[in-house]
Amino acid sequence: MTVLYLILQGKSRFANSRQNVSKRTQKLLILAFILPIMDIIKDFIKYFNNMGGNMGRSSNNREVKKNNRIDTLRAILACERISQPALAAKLGHSGPTVLQNVKELIALGLVQEIGMFASTGGRKAKAFAPVAGARIALGLEVTKTHIGIVAIDFTGKLLHYTQEGREFSMTDGYFRYLGDIVSDFIQKEQLPEERVLGVGISLPGILDDTGKVLAFSHVLNLKNVNTENFNRYIRFPCAFINDANAAGLAEVYGRDDLKNLVYLSLSNSVGGAILADGKLYTGDHLRAGELGHNTLVPNGKLCYCGKKGCVDAYCNANVLSKLTGGDLALFFDRLQDKEQDELMQVWRAYLENLSVVVNNLRMTFDCNIMVGGYVGGFLEEYGGDFREMLARRNPFEPDASYFKYCRHKLGASAIGAALLWVEEFIQNLSAKNKKNSGIE
């Protein structure tokens, strides 16, 4: 019995051993089949990752080239003429990179070679300059009482400006008149239509973030109006912008010293624009820069908005022009007459109020402050000791060098609106290159 038990026990162990060997063999066979497949999958993953990386690098390279080309163009647009070494130093790019970009811009008809600089000991450097008339942009300034229109060249320089009196009305006749003004202006100034990029239109009110809806305008008495009404009869592409924002953009355009600026517009209404690093700050509800409705005098004069004591009630252009039959230029002409004591008293009171407003803005934003609009255009000549008035109100600074006079005395809003199309063209330069010249 004992022997039989041992034999049976041996057979059982042998069977179990064979079973265990069979299971191990199956596992080994499975692994032998799966491992090569896993290696293949890893190779595929590596391949596609490399492809994606190369595609990403290719995309990044194109973006870098595009930005370098745009930077080169901007640097040339900011100068009457500039050399390749000066461009390279200004941009921090290598000489060959700058030269390649310049060649591409020349091929596009946007830059030209205009001779040589005087020698400084080595080879004379070639001089490059923008082809200012390569593109033209138009700007329309819509107000309650008149329409202004400008043409600017590719560098942002004002070419032509005209203004026509016309009361605003929400009618088809008014919008047809806007179309006629553009057509007549182009014909009168003999502007080549094929070079016109588009028409920028500045409006006195709050636009939505798409520019397609004039959400609110006290001045024009409009609410939630489709902006397409204004370009109904204009045969060029149009873009829309708030009037004060447009003027602020016009003032900082091409100026490295005014990247941060609060622009105060003193026209028939008071508005403003806030620019940080050259870009508009519009606020959470697109109302940033409504400086005319800051309170200057609590419970003071009635403002057109229905509130009392607003800056607008004390600093709009009508405060002055109503004393000379609505003619603001005549008001300042008569200031020079020593017998006009009443006008001088009004002007001094106006400047005192304005100094409070400007000082408050300086204390709030701690950046350059500029006054423009109708009154701003006269301030440099007739402001007298205005900077001293500002300095007396400021507890931190001995002078008011932060205060800047506007450079655009007329048509600032129209100029800023036109610049929308210059910027659009520059930003899309890569796409236009690809379309017109095969440059990527």
Image: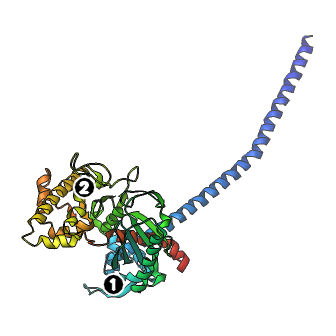
Q: Residue 47, how many percent across, how many down?
A: 64, 58
Residue 397 seen from this side: yes
**Front residue of 310 and 423:** 310
Instruction: Compare marks 1 and 2 and give the one earlier in the sequence.
Output: 1
| Farthest-out residue, bottom | 115
Residue located at (26% from left, 87% from top): 119
Q: Quadrant of the N terminus?
A: top right
Q: Is residue 36 left or right of residue 268?
A: right
**Front residue of 407 and 188:** 188
Instruction: Decide: is 231 above or below 221.
Output: below
Residue topped by disc 1 = 127
Dividing the picture into quadrants, the one containing residue 76 is bottom left
Instruction: Decide: is 35 above or below 132.
Output: above
Specify the amino acid type for callout 1.
Ala
Q: Which mark is residue 313?
A: 2
Residue located at (78% from left, 41% from top): 30
> Label 1's element?
strand
Q: Which mark is residue 427?
A: none
> Label 2's element?
helix
Q: Are marks 1 and 2 in contact (CB under 8 Å)?
A: no
Q: Residue 116, how many percent across, how many down?
A: 31, 88
Specify the amino acid type for callout 2.
Ala
| Farthest-out residue, left | 338
Instruction: Decide: is 56 above or below 41.
Output: below
Instruction: Decide: is 348 above or below 72.
Output: above
| Farthest-out residue, top | 1
Residue 100 seen from this side: no
Q: Residue 371, how many percent across, how many down?
A: 24, 63
